[in-house]
Every structure is written in C-alpha cells, then in structure tokens.
Amino acid sequence: MAGTIRTGGARRFPRLNLNSDGQPHPLLNAASLFTLIIGLFSFALGLFLRSGPSGLHGWAIVTAATGLAGLLVGLLAQMMSATREERIIIVTGIIAAFVGLALGLAHGGFS
C-alpha cells in the first residue's frame, strides 16, 4: 500500500546527491563544495583569532583572504545554481565565509 511505513527489512541510508534534477553539474557541485569547505575553514580560523592570543596578523590575513574567496565563489555559484541542494550548501558556505572574513578584517586582515 502506498504511503505506509515499512517495518523491518533492509535499511536504506540517505544518499548525498546534489543533482536532484537528473542533470550532471560537475562544475557547480565543485564550486558548492569549495564554498562550503573554504567558508568553514575561514570561520574556524576567525574563531581561533577571536579567542586565541593577540599578535597573529598573518593568520588574520589568511582568514580574510579565504573568507573573501569563499564569499566571491559562493555568490557566483549561487547565481548559476540549478538545484535546491546546491543552494543549501552554497548559502551555508557563504554565511561561514562572511563571518570568517569579518573576523579576519576585525583583527587586521588586509591592513
């Protein structure tokens, strides 16, 4: 019967698929994952700068640069994204990259 709950049987694990429309988007998928990874890296470095010792000007530059790269690539990928799954990953990366960029700039990045 359609719509009933299965009891027992083999467990199906969710599959990560960014191409829910059936079309392959290798460049957009790579840009989405790049945005997420670089954004989270910049966010983590920004939190380290915020709570770590002062005088880490080199790390502030790295944090601001990775945040800016994640933000720019993410905004470009967002304009060209084709599926909802890509957009979720891109927006998460953009937000993390923005926070990392802001924390990097607050601690002397690009100055």
Image (cartoon, helix red, strand yellow):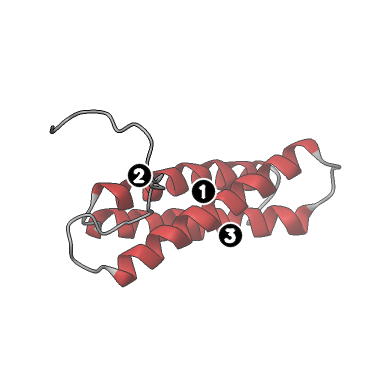
The residue at 84%/48% (across/down) is: 55
User: Element type at marker 2?
Assistant: helix
The residue at 70%/52% (across/down) is: 60
User: Extreme top residue here?
Assistant: 4
Name above or below for residue 7 compared with residue 38.
Answer: above
Residue on which disc 3 sits: 65
Residue 111 visible in the picture: no
Is there a contact, CB below 8 Å, between mark 3 and mark 2? no
Please tell me how crowded label 2 is: few (under 14), some (14-19), or many (20+) other residues with Cα within 10 Å. Answer: some
Residue 57 screen position, x and y as percent: 77, 54
**Image-based side of 56 in relation to 13, left or right:** right
Residue 46 screen position, x and y as percent: 66, 44
State the separation of the CA atoms marked 1 and 3. Answer: 10 Å
Residue on which disc 1 sits: 97
Q: Nearer the viewer, residue 53 or 88?
A: 88
Amino acid type assigned to the residue bearing label 2 in the image: Ile
Name above or below for residue 102 compared with residue 35.
Answer: above
**Image-based side of 24 in relation to 47, left or right:** left
Which mark sits nearer the N-terminus, 1 or 3? 3
